[in-house]
Image: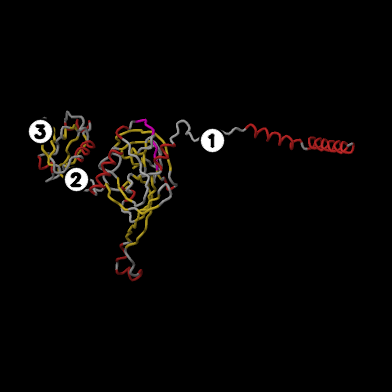
Amino acid sequence: MRRLWLLFAQTVTVGLAIWFIVTTLKPDWVNKNVTGSAALQSIREAPASSAPPANSYRGAARKAMASVVNIYTSKEIQHQRNPLLNDPFLRRFFGDQQNQRTERQSSLGSGVIVSAEGYILTNNHVVESASEIDIALADGRTAAARVVGTDPETDLAVIKINLPNLPVITLGRSEDAQVGDVVLAIGNPFGVGQTVTMGIISALGRNNLTDNAFQNFIQTDAAINPGNSGGALVDVNGNLLGINTAIYSQSGGSVGIGFATPISTVKMVMDAIITQGQVVRGWMGVEPQDITPELAESFGLKQKSGTIIAGVIRGGPADKAGMKPGDILISIDGKPVSGTTEMLNLVAQLKPGNKARIQVLRNNQEPMLDVLIGKRPPTRPEE
């Protein structure tokens, strides 16, 4: 027993000696360990939770992202060689070379699945002239797509894929949208992969922004960049409000001014393409022009707003009904006309083959004209 006690005393003495030497010569060793232990004890971790934080839009994003696809297209571009190569004298030196050179060009965009049958909405400029269209879904699946129909006048297109169990987006109501509402833009900007950006509705009813004949854009400051074209603009519930179509930018990137075609217009175009293969619109055959204060003063017009007929196509519906250049459109079927954009939209909604009552202002009189509405000829906006 005495030997054990002696052994214990010697062990304690040696340990204290070592501790004294370490604390004297290397005090930082001891302080580092103590400080590290205290720091670990002071760290607090939040408990695991599945509930979204306040002001989070993860639910809307998760709901809509599954329906937004990436679109990859390719097309062949024919380039003309130098016409001097057609000269017989130069052929002696350069030989018979092909006068055309073919180049394969690739581009990317986005689209939105709107039907379990595989219909996808996108922009016309995304798939225009494409020889191959490949779709990549958010769940990793891929498929080749075909064009069902396009509408260059609204820059919309419908394409189709054949895959089962497709995630379909819910269509919202753009008519209920107001300036200041929070929206999310979903797409594939610059090809980096599916991306969600947030902003608000900055304005409604924007027009005269592109070469498209029919414009009624939702303006948003949610970041929209090249590759976002054809993607979804959704509300805080994940419902589709519009198709991202254009941006205002001098650099090519987002500056906080983007435009989406509202779902009210999109649905009309989509239904027409799927059921008829094309969009059929009414047409009168006139060249309208907005009445500006300067124009009203120049012509001595009392009318300070509306649409003046700058030209009438010979033999067209308006010409046959007796409409003349200089007439001012007041109403179409009782609906007042305040400008060129409204006039084009009202006429486009009329069914070809039906008569429309057109009221005009001519020489301080307001005659009524019965115009037999024609079918709007297909047009292609300049690039």
Tell me the crowding category of disc 2: few under 14, some 14 to 19, or many 20 or more residues within 10 angstroms, Cα based: some
Q: Quadrant of residue 47?
A: top right
Q: Residues within 10 Å of mark 1 (few under 14, many from 20)?
A: few
Mark 1 or mark 2, whichever is nearer to me = 1
Residue 137 covered by magenta stretch: no
For badge 2, the amino acid type reads: Arg
Q: Which residues fall within the magenta stretch? A: 179-186
- Mark 2–mark 3 contact, CB under 8 Å? no
Answer yes or no: is residue 200 visible.
yes
The disc labelled 3 sits on which kind of residue? Pro
Label 2 SS: loop
Left-right relation of 274 to 64: left
Q: Which residue is mark 1?
A: 48
Query: Can you identify the residue that label 2 sits on?
Result: 376
Residue indicated by mark 3:
367
Where's residue 263, x and y in %?
30, 39
**The quarter of the displayed image where residue 34 is located:** top right
Residue situated in front as seen by the camera: 89 or 138: 138
- Classify mark 3: helix, strand or loop: loop
Q: CA distance from mark 2 to mark 3?
A: 25 Å
Q: Quadrant of residue 308?
A: top left
Do residues under tags 3 and 1 come within 8 Å of each other at their CB atoms? no
